[in-house]
Amino acid sequence: MTPDSLGEEGFLRQVRSGLTIRFGPFRICLRSPLLEAARVFRRLYPDIKLEKDEGIRDFHVEVFPPSGVRRWWRPQVEFRLDGEKPFEPFPRDHAFPLFEWGLNYAIATRAHNYCLLHSAVLEKNGRCLILPALPGSGKSTLCAALMLRGWRLFSDEFGILQPETGRMLPMPRAIPLKNRSIEVIRRFEPGALLGPLFPKTRKGDVAHLAPSRSSLERQGEEGKAGWIVFPRFVPGSSTLVSSVSGSEAFVRLSNNSFNYHLLGEIAFRALTDLVRESECHALRYSDLDEAVAMFDRMVG
Amino acid sequence: MLYHRGTGETHLLDALTVEILDILRSNTLSTPTLAEELARRCQRSADAEWQARIGTTLERLEFLSLVERQR
C-alpha cells in the first residue's frame, strides 16, 4: 500500500488517524488533521510503502493546529514528538516543512545508536559518497543534482553510520532546497518533482525535491564507505579537486557530527575506520554539471 | 589521532608528541632524560633549545591531562 494507491481521500483519512512509514532504519507514526500538509506529503512520497499500524514506532509525530484563538487568528501549527512540543508553533501554511525539520530534530537528538554525521550521502556502485555540510557548501543543491543524475539518495541531511558494521544506512527523504537553489535545480532538471514553494520560512524560501523512486525502493540496502568530499560553492570558480589528509578529514567530520562527543570512543573508532576506507577530497565548484561529471569520473 | 578515555577528548598529535607519549606510556622519566632519549631517536643533540621544546610540549600535555607530573 502506498499514498498513491490509497487515493487522495483514503490517504488523508489515514493521516488523520495515524500513518506508519519507514524512513531508513526508523519507523515513524505520523498523525495530522491538516489536509494541505498531507497533500504535500503525498505529492512528494507517492510511492513510499505504508506499514501496518502495529509494532514499535521509533517516533510518534503529530502536526496539529494549537487549541485556542490561534486556530483561527493567524493560524498556527505545532509539532509534537512523543507528546512533547519541542518548538514554538509555526504559521499553519508551513506545516510540511515543520514536519520535515521536526523529524530531523527527533533523529539528531535521539538516534544515538548510530554515529550521525551532518552530511549528504549518495551511493553509486555500492560505495557511498559523503558530503559533509559546512556553511556555504551548497550541499543540498549538489546532492539534489547528483540524485537527479542517477545517484541513489541516502540522505540530504544525515550520514547514518552504524558503528558495529561500518556501513552507511540510507534514509531517503525530500530535499529542502532553499532560496536560489530552487531555481538552480528547476533549470538543471526541468522534470524534477518539486513540492510547493514555502515563502519566508525560518530558513528563507523553501521548496522540497522528492526523493527518487529507486532511492525509496532501495532504502533497505546499506552501503560501504567510498569517498568523503568537502564541497565548497565558490561563485565563478572552476571545478577543482584536491586531496585532504586522513587526519584533517577526521577532524572536520567529527566536528560536523551530531553526537560524536556523546558516543565517545565508539564514534572515534567508527569515524577512524570510515576515513581509512575512504578517499578524502575537497571540492571547489560553481558549475553543477561540471561537478556532477567530476563525481561520475571519480566513481569510474 | 588519539582518543583519551579519561577525558573523552580527541587529540590530533604531531610525530614528536606521539613519541613522547609512547615513551612515557611505560616509563616515568625526568624532563632532561626524556629529552635525551628523544634526541637519540631523532638523531640530534639534546641542546638547550631542544630541552626547552620538550619542556613546553610536556606542559601542554599536562594541561590536556595526557601526562601527569610526578611530585
Image (cartoon, rainbow, N blue to C red):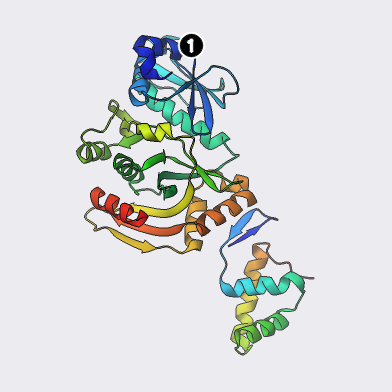
| Image location of residue A130, percent across then percent down | 43, 49
Using a 10 Å C-alpha cutoff, classify the residue at mark 1 as few (fewer than 14 neighbours), some (14 to 19) or many (20 or more).
Answer: few
Q: State the image coordinates of residue A192 (x, y, percent, origin top left).
A: 26, 33
Asked if residue A193 can be seen in this view, the reply is: yes
Image point 34% across, 31% down: which residue? A210
Q: Quadrant of residue B29?
A: bottom right
Relative depth, front residue between A142 and A170: A170
Residue B42 left/right relative to A14: right
Q: Whole-percent x and y of residue A287?
A: 23, 51
Q: Which residue is mark 1?
A: A17
Amino acid type, callout 1: Ser
**Residue A207 left/right relative to B40:** left
Q: Residue at x 21, y 55 (%)?
A: A236
Note whether residue A156 is visible. no
Residue B40 vertical position relative to residue A167 in the rendered view, above or below: below
Percent position of residue A12, x then y: 39, 12
Residue drawn 47% across and 38% down? A170
Outermost residue on the right side: it is B71
Question: Dot 1 falls on which chain?
Answer: A
Q: SS of the residue at dot 1? A: helix
Q: Is residue A254 placed above or below A38 in the rendered structure? A: below
Q: Which picture quadrant has residue A83?
A: top right
Between A64 and A293, which is closer to the camera in this rendering?
Answer: A293
Quadrant location of the N terminus of chain A?
top left
Does residue A196 appear to the left or right of A34 in the view shown? left
So how many labels did they put on this image? 1
Q: Which quarter shows the C terminus of chain A?
A: bottom left
